[in-house]
Amino acid sequence: MNKKLLLSMILAILLVACGQSIDQSETTGTNVEPVAEHKTSAPENDNKASKEKENKEERTEENTDVTAADDENKTNQKTPKTTSLSELKVHYIDAGQADATLFQFSDQDDSYTILYDTGDWNKNDVVNYLKEQDISFIDLIVVSHPHADHIGQMAEIVNTYDVGEVWMSGNETSSQTFQRAIEAVLESDAEYHEPRTGESFDVGPMNIDVLHPSSLTGKLNEDSLSLLFTYGDTKFIFTGDAGKDEEVQMINRNIDINAAILRLGHHGSNTSTDSAFIEAVKPEVAIYSAGANNSYGHPHPDVVTRVQDAVVDLYGTDIHGTIIVTTDGNTYDISTNKDGTISPKSTESAKSSTSKQNTKKKEVKEDNETPLEKGEASNHCVDINAASFEEVQEIIHIGPERAQDLIDLRPYHTVDDLTNIKGIGPARIDDIKQQNTACVGG
């Protein structure tokens, strides 16, 4: 009995111990639950990663929006909002066989005036036109290059008006017109600058980008200061007398040269306005400056054809007189003081002049001819201050290249001043005087 009781007691103790083990096992089971949750939480962590990715994408989109907004702000800084711009008037002044363009605009209480080129040396038409516009101050004068038909009236203009700043290419000539202009600038209070490709400036709400030159070659026409004027969404390009090679350089530079209004280079000469340049600029309007019935054949028939084949409206001061473009930076209107239509047929006389010029080149190809070899002395006067490119070649020792130099170095006080032309020395001046063709008009 005692043994049975002892065994019963032992069994009871074991059963109690087993019961406690089961309870502990159940308790341990509840403690395993976090491990299961951890396993099942993997998808939850994946969701967190997904959310983080979504948040990152949202932040990226937000940053993109900010970048776009910054880009838009930069654009707006360069190109003012058209809705807030006042009226801009661009006057393509009828300056004969010369160039002069006047910009007038304002910004709230501030008025601005810019003059690109200043007309011919032997006239005062640009000076008079400025007086008619009631101008008191010129913020900026730009001279594309120092030829007398571009810098001609600068001295008088600078001496008449207060000028804020003057831009020039940096090339110089020995002509009296250039010397007077430089002296006037130096004696004025105007700032002076020689812009180069890539520079950008603001004159009130007007932005100006420099297209050319990047450096000087010493060639006056080729180094013409070429600019892109941006007023709101309306753009204007001016290239002075720059040629086709320079136009190609402008195309190849990392500058957007698309513009609504293109000023044709070199008065509409065939040395400028290449088809590739027209295609790059994509102008809606082209304007040139030339004298009526000029002896240079400007505008050249090929240029007229190229422009019109590109479906570009063409205006010229020889046909339309002064041409005024008015814009609010969004839309623009064009008004002229004369009616007329430009077509290649209107330049037939220019073709015959070119033919005569080529014939003349053959006649004077021997540059060292003496008056006796050319024939008897002439009583015909060729005014070296006014004669055309073709006419000055009637003078002994003046071939096509020197004819251009002769025109560029005007004015002259005496025939002896022709020594300013390269290759014309005292001996050739004597030949010129003996020929009795060259003269200085009154």
Image (spheres, helix red, strand yellow):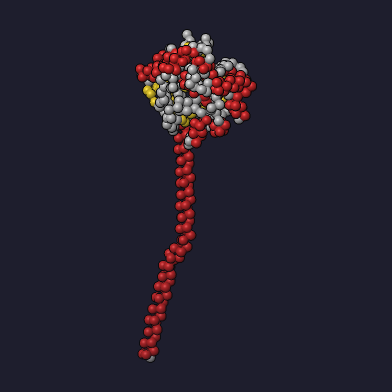
Q: Position of residue 55 (x, y in %)?
A: 46, 49
Q: Position of residue 434 (x, y in %)?
A: 47, 12
Q: Looking at the image, which residue is at 49% across and 13% down?
A: 435
Above or below residue 279? Residue 340 is: above
Q: Position of residue 287 (x, y in %)?
A: 55, 23
Label total for image? 0
Q: Name the residue furthest right.
A: 345
Q: Name the residue furthest top.
A: 442
Q: Looking at the image, which residue is at 37% across and 18% down?
A: 183
**Closest to the observer, 229 or 142:** 142
- Can residue 288 be seen by looking at this rendering? no
Q: Name the residue furthest front.
A: 372
Above or below residue 321? Residue 309 is: below
Q: Looking at the image, which residue is at 57% across and 31% down?
A: 275
- Can residue 78 be seen by looking at this rendering? yes
**Closest to the observer, 308 or 23:** 308
Q: Position of residue 390 (x, y in %)?
A: 54, 19
Q: Quadrant of the N terminus?
A: bottom left
**Closest to the observer, 165 or 67:** 165
Q: Looking at the image, which residue is at 48% across and 10% down?
A: 441
Tell me the quarter of the picture where residue 330 sits: top right
**Closest to the observer, 346 or 369:** 369
